Amino acid sequence: MILQRVEQADWLSNAYLVTDEPGGATVLIDSNGVIEPLLERVDREGLDLTHILLTHDHWDHVVGLGELAKERGIPILGHEITAERVDFKVDQILSDGEVVTTGGLSVEAIFTPGHAAGHFAFLINGTDVVTADVIFKGTVGGTMAPGATGFEDLKHSIMERLMTLPPETRIHPGHKEPSTVADEWENNPFVRIWRGLDPEGDEKCEVNQKGEATLVLWAPDYDGTNKAWVRFPDGTDNITGGSQITKK
């Protein structure tokens, strides 16, 4: 299997081209506006691009896909909620656990809501998983942006769906560089607290437009800033960017 990614310089979002073998069956997972190197490889090597797979509906992961699908006659596949939220046609609705087979590729859709309601991770040939915006190297996705379904969904998606994959499974996130299940299990600060290895914080903070909260965790984010896990007075937990936090 051959997996290539391109990263957009401003959003730091990734798009992936996955091929079973040289000249073989290929799928594109997401788009970030700079997928030309991937398409050039498809054309140069005569790859058989058979499917476009959507992880979720956020703009930095779907830009240009409608036009690409029309130009090349390639079907787009994704969750039914994602299909409702994008401004182009999704040709096939996938459900949790459904497997897309093309050539020597077997791609399982794993429903992973939290950051987005129709979010999928894609497990490829049992060895590699494209996790999009659920978990990244050293951090996790936010749960306070429009369309998110919340902290508990995100935690379940990570701990019960992704962290239960074999430790050697390679993680290919929606932003920045790859990791493995084993690395995130041991080193991701959110996962470590969920495992009971590290304590929760109790510092008071202010969340922009949301009011006072407890800062459970202040951790690095993939873009060099910070990600915050906060708990509001009613007991509701959420994860947001550090820019939304004022420490007291």
Image: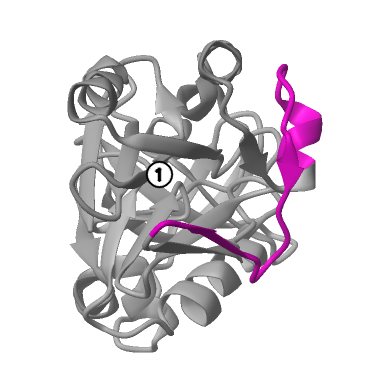
Q: Position of residue 193 (x, y in %)?
A: 38, 78
Identify whether 35 is placed above or below 151: above
Crowdedness near tag 1: few (<14), some (14–19) or many (≥20) residues, C-alpha within 10 Å: few
Q: Position of residue 228 (x, y in %)?
A: 41, 50
Secondary structure of the residue carrying tag 1 is loop
Residue 121 appears left or right of 79 = left
Report the quarter where the C terminus lies: top left
Task: Give the residues in magenta.
Answer: 81-103
Q: Is residue 165 magenta?
A: no
Q: Quadrant of the N terminus?
A: bottom left
| Residue 131 picture location, percent across and down | 42, 55
Q: Which residue is mark 1?
A: 248
Residue type beneath disc 1: Lys
Q: Is residue 220 something one can see in this rendering?
A: yes
For the residue pair 43 and 201, the one nearer the viewer reads as 43
Residue 154 appears left or right of 137: right
Name the residue furthest bottom: 196
